[in-house]
Amino acid sequence: MKTTLKTSITVKDICEGFIYNELEGKGLFGLSGKLTIQPEYQRNYIYASDGGKKEVAVIESMLKGYPIGLIYFNKVSGDRLEVLDGQQRITSAGRFVTDKFAIKDENKMEQYFAGMAKDKKEKILETKLLVYECEGTESEIKEWFKTINIAGVPLNNQELLNAVYSGPYVTLCKEEFSNSQNANIQKWSAYVKGSANRQEFMECALDWVSKGNIGDYMCSHRFEKNINELKNYFNSVIDWVSTVFADVENEMCGLEWGRLYEKYHKKAYDPGKVSADLRKLYADPYIQDHKGIFEYILGGSVDTKLLEVRVFDEATKKAVYATQTAKAEKKNESNCPHCAIGHDANKSKVWKLNEMDADHVAAWSKGGATAAKNCQMLCKTHNRAKGNR
Ligand SMILES: [Zn+2]
């Protein structure tokens, strides 16, 4: 890969013909149309999120004469360039000089570019950028792109994959899953964590359809002109979850719905009963982690390990151990009630506290409480044998 350092390109040059697409949330062109600011493998513009602190910081740096870092262009052909790295900073500049956002002046007043003093405007427009123009094959550029992690927000895994497998398929995926204007996003957000412009819905959809092999899947579909399989699968999972569970709970967001769909979608559920069971489990004070409730119900309400039922605390265990051991010693039998009724050498064995575990006398799943009067200490072997708490 060949690189040339350019030091004479100014913000004014870059912003000549700058276009920002509000709908897609990205800066499109600059340098009088010669520069593509956001090639299809680049991520969407994210400096405006989080209250726009990052884009304001770019402008303030320019006003103070601070460097804003290296920028990389990829020479595509003739005089056509595309931004390899620096797209967020360039879009910040372009958005500012086209009055898309304001900064605060010395008196904390909002100030748009159009209303700025002439000298300040010039300071911004004449800011020189440090630009490396790179020339190389597509695979060289992409490989390099994959290894950089410079300035600003590092690329996440899906953004890297989009760069590596850029093409018509990625473009279509982005139109569907990375467009924050898509009306479905609100529904998806109940079940999928993340944001559209960091490609997290796209990542989730690909993860589900590929059963976790996103890279392989993208590689084999790279040049396809439709994303029907991906869309259908993703929608099937979402429809299934929202049909089985009429309720929408916070803990549903980010669960492994793809895996659960594969495992359970052929089973029939009565949404009314599911909802009643869900309400009951949510109201149970002994269940500490609500995330496991969904798979517990899907599996037929048997695997209590999924629920993290609250265990007895140390003080309760110690107190129960002391009473149990004192009684057992009087009768000269084991302090594990199960050992005491057995017929082997442990019949009169007195176990130490750390050799025993607390057990629900009446199992939690049968309504037993996690309270001292429902606690008994068993030797580890017998507690394990009892299993279901
Ligand atoms: Zn025992």
Image (cartoon, rainbow, N blue to C red):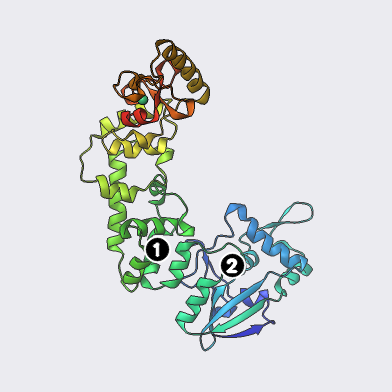
* Coordinates of residue 8 in the picture (x, y in percent): 69, 82
Specify the label residue 91 is tagged with: 2
Judged left or right of residue 315, residue 221 is left
Element type at marker 2? helix
Asked whether the viewer can see residue 362, the reply is no
Q: Quadrant of residue 345?
A: top left
* Coordinates of residue 332 in the picture (x, y in percent): 40, 14
**Which residue is disc 1 drawn over?**
175
Q: What's the amino acid at mark 1?
A: Glu
Where is the C terminus found, in terms of image quarters?
top left
Q: Residues within 10 Å of mark 2 (few under 14, many from 20)?
A: many
Judged left or right of residue 89, residue 186 is left
Tell me the residue at 52%/89% (across/down). 78
Tell me the residue at 42%/39% (across/down). 251
Q: Alpha carbon of mark 2 to alpha carbon of mark 1: how far?
A: 20 Å
- Above or below for 326 versus 276: above
Tell me the residue at 49%/17% (across/down). 322
- Residue furthest to the bottom in view is 78
- Compare marks 2 and 1 and give the one earlier in the sequence: 2
Comparing 250 with 303, the one in front is 303
Judged left or right of residue 243, residue 49 is right
Where is the N terminus found, in terms of image quarters?
bottom right
- Above or below for 75 versus 253: below
* Coordinates of residue 384 in the picture (x, y in percent): 35, 32
